Amino acid sequence: MADSAPATTPFDLDAYLARIGWKGERRPDAETLRGVHLAHLRAIPFENLDAVGGRAPSLRLADLMDKLVHGVRRGGYCYEHNTLFAAALEALGLGVTRLTARVVVGAERFEDRPRTHMALLVEVPGEPLPHLADVGFGAIGSLLEPVSLTAGTEFHDAGRLHRLVHAPGRGPLETWVLEAHGPGGWAAQYAFTVEPFEQPDYEVINWHVATNPRSPFSRAPYVQCLTPDAHLLLASGRVTTTRTDGTVTEREPADETEARRVLAEEFGIDAPEGLRLLD
């Protein structure tokens, strides 16, 4: 399992903001939170290539800075993205509670899904309610901007439509569900409660998701990136482009060489040598 010792080098806010292209204010307010959230999503892709290659990615801040900020053209999955993003928000003066969630897309019963997703609850000074923030959800139903922890309100976040609702729970805490609106109406994305989780918790979950042979993240590449005009996904040997007007196109790379070229040119990712991208 990955070593959970703390990073020995500090988080570099200047380097992080340069990586995501953020040139706006650095205030601990809702406007900065929304702007940095969207900038992160458009700058750093989602990918599980370390897990497909047989290893759990490091969650040390120093290693995340090397991989996602300073290093080669790579991305990461939820624990990497949201661990890095949480550090950025705290450096900006915002309060952050790290959460876990059950990904329930397509599930008949929420309880059938384990808590394998990391999300964030962000306290903004002067705001009466915290915000749900999440730059690491690998799905087209992901949040583009944080939303207030309010049940039943529809949020238009940078062109997507979301809402939070309550669901029956089995414990003393309320169960919240993030829903996204798509062609088929409202669809549940993940369910969560608001008790805090700590770094050792994510080390265990990260190792399980990356190395369990039954985990979807250990079996095949899943890569996505976001532009102002489209959502790009490489999965199951196909590249799917969903534009902001709802137009969807699919194509299949002819071979590994073309798949690597597509990742490099369209996703901004240089895949590790020797890793197969196509089934």
Image (cartoon, grey):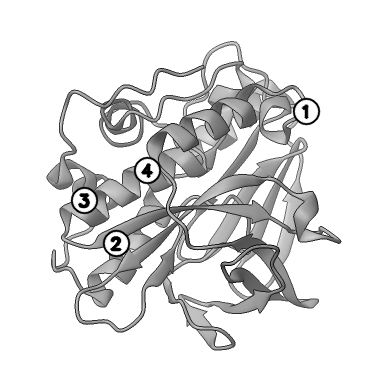
For the residues labelled 4 and 3, the Cα–Cα distance comes to 15 Å
For the residues labelled 2 and 4, the Cα–Cα distance comes to 15 Å
> From the viewer's perspective, is the residue at label 2 or at label 1 nearer?
1
Residue underneath mark 1: 214
Which quadrant of the view contains residue 53?
Answer: top right
> From the viewer's perspective, is the residue at label 4 or at label 3 nearer?
4
Residue at 23 percent across and 69 percent down: it is 32
Q: Earlier in the sequence, mark 2 or mark 4?
A: 2
Mark 2 surroundings: few (<14), some (14-19) or many (≥20) residues within 10 A: many
Q: Quick check: marks 2 and 4 in contact, CB under 8 Å?
A: no
Q: Is residue 42 visible?
A: yes
Q: Earlier in the sequence, mark 4 or mark 1?
A: 4
Which quadrant of the view contains residue 103?
Answer: bottom right
Identify the mark at residue 71; answer none if there is no mark: none
Q: Earlier in the sequence, mark 4 or mark 3?
A: 3
For the residues labelled 3 and 1, the Cα–Cα distance comes to 36 Å
**Which one is nearer the viewer's eye here, 145 or 97?**
97
Q: Is residue 38 visible?
A: no
Kind of residue indicated by mark 1: Arg
For the residues labelled 3 and 2, the Cα–Cα distance comes to 8 Å
Q: Quick check: marks 3 and 2 in contact, CB under 8 Å?
A: yes
Residue at 63 percent across and 76 percent down: it is 245
Identify the mark at residue 36; answer none if there is no mark: 2
Q: Secondary structure at mark 4?
A: helix
Residue underneath mark 4: 83
